[in-house]
Image (cartoon, helix red, strand yellow):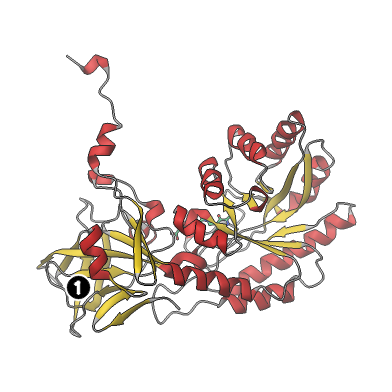
Amino acid sequence: MDHFTYRDGVLHAENVPLTAIAEAVGTPVYIYSRATLERHAQVFREALSGLPRKHIAFAIKANPNLAVLKVLARQGFGADVVSGGEIARALAAGMKAEDIVFSGVGKTRAELQYGLDMGIGQFNLELEEEGAVLADLAHAAGKTASAVLRVNPNVDAGTHAKISTGKSENKFGVPISEAKAIFARLSGRPGLNLRGVALHIGSQLFDLGPLEAAYARIGELVRELRGEGHGIDRVDLGGGLGVPYERDKVPPSPADYGRMVERVTQGWDVTLMFEPGRVIVGNAGVLLTRVIWVKPGVTHPYVIVDAAMNDLARPAMYDAWHDFEAVRPSGEKIVAHIAGPVCETGDTFAMNRTIDVVRSGDLGIFRTAGAYGATMASTYNSRPLVPEVMVDGDRFAVVADRIEPASIIAAERVPDFLQD
Ligand code: LLP
């Protein structure tokens, strides 16, 4: 459920007509609904309420905007981070260092050190050597790093290849078959408290079956590790729950997911860690855009909007679907293509799509743009960096400025050897 609804024929975010935001801030612009974010956080927490010990770490990569993080911090969420920059954001939003999980397949030594200095609650190790380096850095600083080992369970999550992470050929985690040997070599090392295991098999999952299979495998591993004398008190189950990008496609609900987790993890006697991203923020955001032209096409017209692949990369990168709706729909529909102004054929949001009739100057939205939207934006084609707005009841605020090309050009230099 979200708070982007029509009232008197105009699409609103909570109590604010999107026309008012377009007028005040311009387009394209991302719009987040605070009430939707809070509701999703509560629904997810509620779904896990039957579990005795758990910690929810929002996957910041899905939406790192400070205002969004602040809302989730107030809901008691920690953060799953993958870079020093994300650690800085989580801390700036008021999340506690001990509630931060540091994932990422390529953490640099400097980032590991920064994580240690800040007192990060859990490092998710991606390979044995990383564990050895972390132990040495921690030991040298007179600290003990709390860590879990990410395993690759070799299951097919049944999602897009570019966001599938749990198959043996993917770059993530250590093969589950090698986990015991790595545990034997790393545990007991001064500076390291290797206390559990982690997995994350992919994103935008619509089938709980592969997740359940992966969790069952990791449960088996926990029993084996304990059998070898290792103290295991944490299992990180990752994120990945899908969201409906198309109205008629229904993903498993957080409640379904919670019931499955309760069933599979019964008797594990660990703190379960969760790293949801998309399911919390996806439907809490839309991308508002204005139609520049409706250009006649050979089969159907091209609706050329002022948002492009640099603002919302998902359709170009993953052939992702985002529903398009007019802000003031007339009730009439047409079949059209929707594309942005960037000079690439891939800058296309939809082909042969039945949409609300729109004309030059009209406003429209792409739905479900709160996750992996603004954060994946670029300035390609020297376009401005897209701004972000948060709505709260009948007020709204710009929570990230539009960065104009002039500021970006000002950060570039023409070297001396070209100054003649
Ligand atoms: N934990 C780990 C270790 C991850 O790699 C990810 C996502 C998550 C948690 C959060 O997954 P979520 O709950 O959001 O599915 N840019 C792509 C998605 C990339 C996901 C990367 N990892 C997209 O737009 O679909």
Q: Is residue 71 above or below residue 355?
A: above
Question: Residue 156 in the image: x percent, y percent?
Answer: 58, 64
- Which residue reaches farthest front? 395
- Label 1 near ligand 1 (CB < 8 Å): no
Along the line of sight, which residue is nearer the eye, 115 or 393? Answer: 393
Q: Taking the image as drawn, is residue 202 in sight? A: no
Along the line of sight, which residue is nearer the eye, 415 or 5? Answer: 5
Question: Residue 399 in the image: x percent, y percent?
Answer: 38, 55
Q: Name the residue carrying label 1.
A: 336
**What's the amino acid at mark 1?**
Ala
Along the line of sight, which residue is nearer the eye, 71 or 124? Answer: 71
In the picture, measured across the screen, residue 83 lies left or right of residue 136, that is left
Q: In this view, does 49 lie above or below 407?
A: below
Question: Residue 194 in the image: x percent, y percent?
Answer: 78, 47
Residue at horizontal 59 percent and vertical 52 percent from the top: 95
Place residue 144 in its image quadrant. top right
Along the line of sight, which residue is nearer the eye, 25 or 186? Answer: 25
Bin the neighbour count of mark 1 within 10 Å (Cα to Cα): few under 14, some 14-19, many 20 and up: many
Residue at horizontal 51 percent and vertical 57 percent from the top: 70
Q: Taking the image as drawn, is residue 149 in sight? A: yes
